[in-house]
Structures are given as C-alpha cells and as structure tokens.
Image: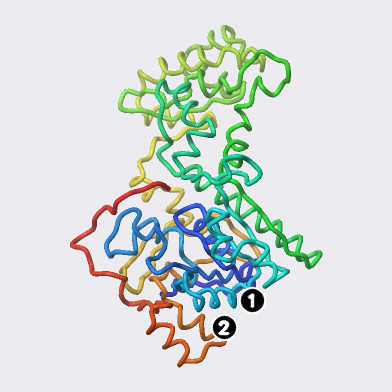
Amino acid sequence: MTTTANARPGALHGVRVVDLTSVVLGPLATQILGDYGADVVKVEGMEGDHSRARGVTVHRGMASIYLAINRNKRSIAVDLKTPEGRAVLERLIAGADVVVHNMRVRAIEKLGFGYDSVKALNPRVVYCAATGFDQDGPDRDKPAFDDIIQAACGLVALNEAGQGRTGYAPTLVADKTAGMAVVNAVLAALFHRERTGEGQYVEVPMFETLVSFMLTEHLAGKTFVGSDRGGGYQRLLTGGRKPAPTLDGEIAILPYTARHWTAFFTAAGRPDLVVEYAVNDRQARSDNIPAMYRSMAEITAVRTTAELMRMCEELDIPATTIYTIDGLLEHPQLEAVGLFETAEHSCEGTLRYVRPATKFAATPASVRSQAPVLGQHSSELLHELGFDAAAIDDLCRRGIVIQGDPRVSDSLSLPGVTAAAEGPG
C-alpha cells in the first residue's frame, strides 16, 4: 500500500519510534514523526487502536479517523498481558530511538514499561509520556479526554462569554494541540541526544498544555499581579468577532490595521467613521472595536458577498468567503498546491488524504504508506527482531501475535458507508 516517496529521505530517516499510543493525540503526533521520515512501529493490542472505530467506516477496524492519523506506520498486534508479548516489546524498545505512549502512568508501569524499566533496556531512548494531567499534581491519575480538557482549560466558559452559550469546539482541539506539543518535545529531546548522547524522560500533560495555549491572549488582566482586571481578551469576546452578514449570506472580513479600517470605511462611503472611531490611534481603535464591528456589519448587510470580496481584494483587506468542510475540496488555493492527494489502499480502495503541509527543501516530508490493517507487519517486524519462522508461527498460533492480511480488513465489509459509533477524542 505504498503511496508516494521522495527521492531524498526525510529529516528523521533512521530514527525508530515505538508508538504505544491510541485514539487521536498520540497517533497524530507519531504520524507527523513518520511524515518527517521516522520508522514508526505502531504496537497495538489484540483489538487494535480505539480510533479504528471512530469516524466513517467502510470496513470495520479501518474508520476514517484511524486512516487520517496512522499513515507511515507499521503495525504489530501483540498481547502485552503475556510474558511472550512483553518480551517482543522489550526487543522493540531495545533498538528504538523514541518511545511514545498516552496511557495513564500507573497503567504502563504496571505493564512493566514505565520510564525506569525502559531506560534499563535502552539508556539512550527518548521516552515521551503524553499524560492527561501533570504527574506532580493531585489530578495525575484522572482520565482525560478532549471534552474534559476543553471544559477544564477554560475554552467552554469562553464560548459562553463570547457566544452567549456554552459548548465544545467542534474539533478535537485539545487532542490535536497536545499532539503537536508531543512532536515538538520529541524533536527537542532528539536534538539534545544528538549533541550529548543522553536520552531522557519527557512529559507532555494535556491539561497544562491547553491552559498554556488558551492563556496566550486570555490571561489578559490577570497578567498583572494585584490588578482587579479579569482574564479574557475582550477583542475576541465582545468585539463582534463573527462572520459579517451579506445580502446573500455571510463573509469573514478582518480589517486589522488603521490602513485596513480607513480603506474599508472610505470605500464603503463612510469616511466619517474613520474620525468617529479614531481609527489612526491604536489604543482608541482597540477600545472602539465593538462599535466598529457593528458599523462594519451594517455596511456588509447591504452588499453581496462577491461585491465585498472584490472590494477587499482590491484594498488588500483580509477576507474570505466561508467554506464548508466539503467545499474545501474545491478551494482554489488548496487545488493549486495539491494539498489533497489520493492513493490506492490495499483493502479500502481509493483514499483521499491531506498530504503533509510543512515543506522542507532538503529533507522532504512524505507519505510512503497508508494506515496499516491490524498486525499487518507483525511477522516482518518479528523477523527483524531475530525471531525465526517457527517462533513467529508459534506466537501467531497461540494468539500472542496477530498477523493481519493487508488485503483484508479485520472484519467483514459493512453494507455501504456508515458512521461508526463516536466516543471521546
């Protein structure tokens, strides 16, 4: 199920990552490492990653979310509750550069693969634990999923302040943000090891990562100790930050600088507003933002979306029509850069996917293979670890390892395309 391969290897070529993650946060992080050239070995339990049943499904075990975050990986399915299964993982870890997991720390320690145990097997390993909560705090053992972290980090409350209603963001913002933090942390630790030869323990706590993410702009008045001003960036919460109405729909316009606002109001025939709102005074303009957005909405409401887009393009004012998820497939910018690619998957047919967006001139990111079926590479990896054919057959026969057929998903085809049962991110 190969896809495309660049002639030059990626930046992480030669780095082996043992991926003990599941759902979204961890698999997204390890996929990015794979896109950058790493050899990612996805170690799955006998039922496979939970994300195999998340999203839209044609064949059981190969749902759309799983397919989106597990390319460039090799899958081995092994029963880690058995001594023989744990011995397989020990061999994998002994030759690894990176180990990433998002289990609860007590659970992975009980399994025998906490940091101290892994360090004993491989002192040079970069060991990254993606935890729910910082392990030095009282919530260290609590379960953490995207919805829980969105609520805990202030995002849900900010929705109420800005939109007048509570609600979760309609994307797995906590999982994906923390996943990218995992990538950054692993790369930094690998750079340190490159210079010193020293491996280390790395923890990326989801809750604390998202609090830091949220408070970049929203710490606001709480930045100043002793101030009675509260948190929350008011430009976003009360500044009218929402799509502007048009005669035939809505449009996103963001006049940001004095030049933008002056050009917009002048072109709309309201140069008086430039003076009324003191547009050229940065602080006054910031204070007047709510009223300025209200005036902007009055102006846009009597013009068509196309007319406004032409005006903004001529004036170099940031603006865009509003795209649906389906509409993104026809976005002219995305079509021009070829962000969406297709490939033949051995059991799922033709798949559309989003190529790596980041570009490297010397070490290109690439999609070398699509997401594997459960245990697709078990025998291949066991052979690399020194198991002979008889030992591999024995492990498979005894149900300690699953060798998946890359031509067949792990269950029967479903009639048509269905939406799999959803669960926490």
Circle 1 packing at 10 Å, graded few (<14), some (14-19), many (20+), is some
User: In the rendered image, which quarter is residue 214 located in?
Assistant: top right
User: In the rendered image, which quarter is residue 16 located in?
Assistant: bottom right
- Residue at 81% of width from left, 65% of height from top? 196
Up/down of 171 relative to 75, above or below: above
Question: In this rendering, would 163 be left or right of 232?
Answer: left
Kindly indicate whether the residue at mark 1 contacts the one at mark 2 (C-beta within 8 angstroms).
yes
The quadrant of the rendering that contains the N terminus is bottom left
- Which residue appears farthest toward the right when viewing the image? 196
User: In the rendered image, which quarter is residue 376 located in?
Assistant: bottom left
Q: Nearer the viewer, residue 355 or 303?
A: 355
Residue for badge 1: 95
- Residue at 40% of width from left, 39% of height from top? 170
Element at badge 2?
A: loop
> Could you say which disc has been placed on residue 404 in the image?
none
Q: Amino acid at mark 1?
A: Gly
- Residue at 68% of width from left, 63% of height from top? 116
- Measured from the top left, where is residue 88 in percent x and y? 53, 77
How many badges with numbers are in the image?
2
Element at badge 1?
A: loop
Up/down of 202 relative to 18, above or below: above
Q: Amino acid at mark 2?
A: Leu
- Measured from the top left, where is residue 91 in percent x and y? 59, 78
- Residue at 53% of width from left, 73% of height from top? 86
